Image (spheres, rainbow, N blue to C red):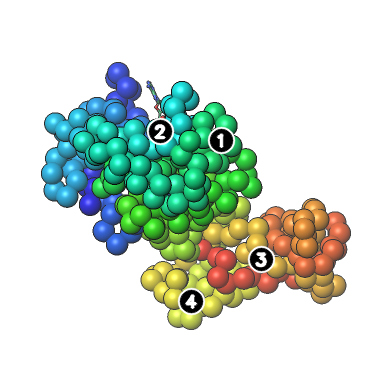
């Protein structure tokens, strides 16, 4: 288990990570560190790897302070955004790179390279030149190289950022399968909340140098720590509500309190809505009026005004600007802000 206590990191006099307390591992195999660009995610990851000095606080693994332990002795695998494979070497030589230094024999290294190529679904690719690989293949080789020495922790810094959207989704699933199959506790840095939810058991949200929320993806969305976290996770509207004994009352209707919301205290609250949290149905007696409508695939993305307030919604049928609609909340797509 990785344990950070009050960790701060500075570049010169500029502190970019502020007193972070964080635990990684335990029941969660994959942990995402999620936050907007520039919030300090990479800096924190680099400090954990030993690539950046810690200005104050402690980084420990299984109770051992890592302060005096250099990067190559920490037994952590690291993969950066662009993989950083050695261009002059083959795929097999790249994967075997960390093994020779650990005194692994050539025959054992060949065997381990073959195992890892199977794991990352590039069997038989050992003799290929890395310059011939696609972006997605290169990232899988980078993950194989990091896993080859059987690290006790894998650190992935935006491993998908350089790839296009479709490949990112495929590779997010592939990399998660790979690290789960290898059983290696992993931290993955990302600025994409969908990617974080696809890959991780637990997501920690970072804002301006601090970790502001940590929970399983579903919990994070249903009970975000604050409005900023809710919006960062895709909320487009935050509305007032009142929690009663069995329902959350809002201006557009009541929502049943399900298990995810069970710990929300009774009384006034802020409900977080995504565009798909409200369904719009054309209804001449509806209280909302459509002010925007855009066709998506098989659905319409709508903006409708109710009681003077514009809300996002989705509709299964075509609706036009000026149409009256009724808005129906989709309970499991609505979060309640914690604080
Ligand atoms: N080597 C450096 N020297 C000085 N400042 C740096 C250095 N590296 C990063 N910073 C600054 O530290 C802050 C945090 O950067 P960091 O790269 O850790 O953020 P990030 O959340 O990983 O962002 P991104 O998603 O864009 O990579 C930023 O303001 C950045 O400009």
- The residue shown at (24%, 39%) is 104
Separation of residues labelled 1 and 3 (CA atoms): 44 Å
Whichever of labels 1 and 3 marks the residue nearer the N terminus, that label is 1
Element at label 4 = loop
Q: Nearer the viewer, residue 56 or 94?
A: 94
Horizontal relation, residue 275 to residue 78: left or right: right
Instruction: Kindly identify which numbered label has been placed on residue 258.
Output: 4
Instruction: Kindly identify which numbered label has been placed on residue 133.
Output: 1
Q: Is residue 54 above or below residue 272?
A: above
Determine whether label 4 and label 3 are within 8 Å by CB: no
Q: Is residue 254 visible?
A: yes
Label 3 CB less than 8 angstroms from ligand 1:
no
Q: Is residue 142 above or below residue 117?
A: above
Considering the image in quadrants, where does the C terminus appear? Answer: bottom left
The residue at the far top in this view is 12
Q: Is residue 81 visible?
A: no
Q: Nearer the viewer, residue 179 or 224?
A: 179
- Which of discs 1 and 3 lies nearer the camera? The answer is 1
- In x, y percent, where is residue 56? 19, 32
- Which of discs 1 and 4 lies nearer the camera? The answer is 1
Instruction: Kindly identify which numbered label has been placed on residue 278.
Output: 3
The residue at the far front in this view is 107
Whichever of labels 2 and 4 marks the residue nearer the N terminus, that label is 2
Which residue is label 2 attached to? 94
Horizontal relation, residue 295 to residue 233: left or right: right
Instruction: Kindly identify which numbered label has been placed on residue 275.
Output: none
Dot 1: few (<14), some (14–19), or many (≥20) neighbours within 10 Å? some
Determine whether label 2 and label 3 are within 8 Å by CB: no
């Amino acid at each position: 288990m990785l344990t950070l206590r009050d960790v701060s990191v500075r570049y010169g006099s500029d502190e970019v990570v502020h007193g972070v307390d964080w635990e990684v591992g335990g029941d969660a195999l994959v942990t995402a560190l999620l936050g907007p660009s520039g919030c300090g995610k990479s800096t924190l990851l680099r400090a954990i790897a030993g690539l950046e000095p810690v200005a104050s606080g402690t980084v420990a693994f299984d109770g051992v302070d890592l302060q005096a332990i250099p990067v190559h002795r920490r037994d952590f695998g690291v993969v950066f955004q662009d993989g950083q494979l050695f261009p002059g070497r083959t795929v097999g030589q790249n994967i075997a790179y960390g093994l020779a230094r650990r005194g692994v024999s050539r025959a054992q290294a060949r065997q381990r390279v073959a195992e890892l190529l199977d794991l990352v679904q590039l069997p038989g690719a050992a003799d290929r030149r890395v310059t011939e690989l696609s972006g997605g293949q290169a990232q899988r080789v980078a993950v194989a190289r990091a896993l080859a020495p059987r690290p006790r922790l894998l650190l992935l810094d935006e491993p998908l950022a350089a790839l296009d959207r479709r490949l990112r989704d495929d590779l997010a699933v592939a990399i998660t399968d790979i690290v789960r199959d290898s059983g290696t506790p992993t931290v993955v840095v990302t600025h994409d909340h969908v990617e974080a939810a696809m890959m991780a058991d637990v997501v920690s949200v970072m804002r301006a140098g601090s970790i502001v929320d940590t929970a399983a993806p579903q919990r994070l969305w249903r009970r975000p720590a604050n409005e900023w976290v809710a919006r960062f996770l895709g909320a487009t509207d935050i509305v007032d509500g009142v929690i009663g004994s069995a329902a959350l009352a809002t201006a557009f209707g009541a929502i049943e309190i399900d298990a995810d919301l069970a710990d929300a205290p009774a009384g006034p609250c802020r409900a977080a809505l995504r565009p798909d949290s409200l369904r719009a149905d054309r209804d001449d007696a509806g209280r909302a009026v459509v002010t925007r409508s855009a066709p998506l695939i098989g659905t319409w993305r709508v903006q409708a005004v109710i009681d003077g307030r514009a809300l996002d919604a989705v509709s299964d049928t075509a609706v036009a600007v000026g149409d009256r609609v009724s808005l129906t909340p989709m309970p499991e797509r609505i979060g309640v802000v914690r604080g």
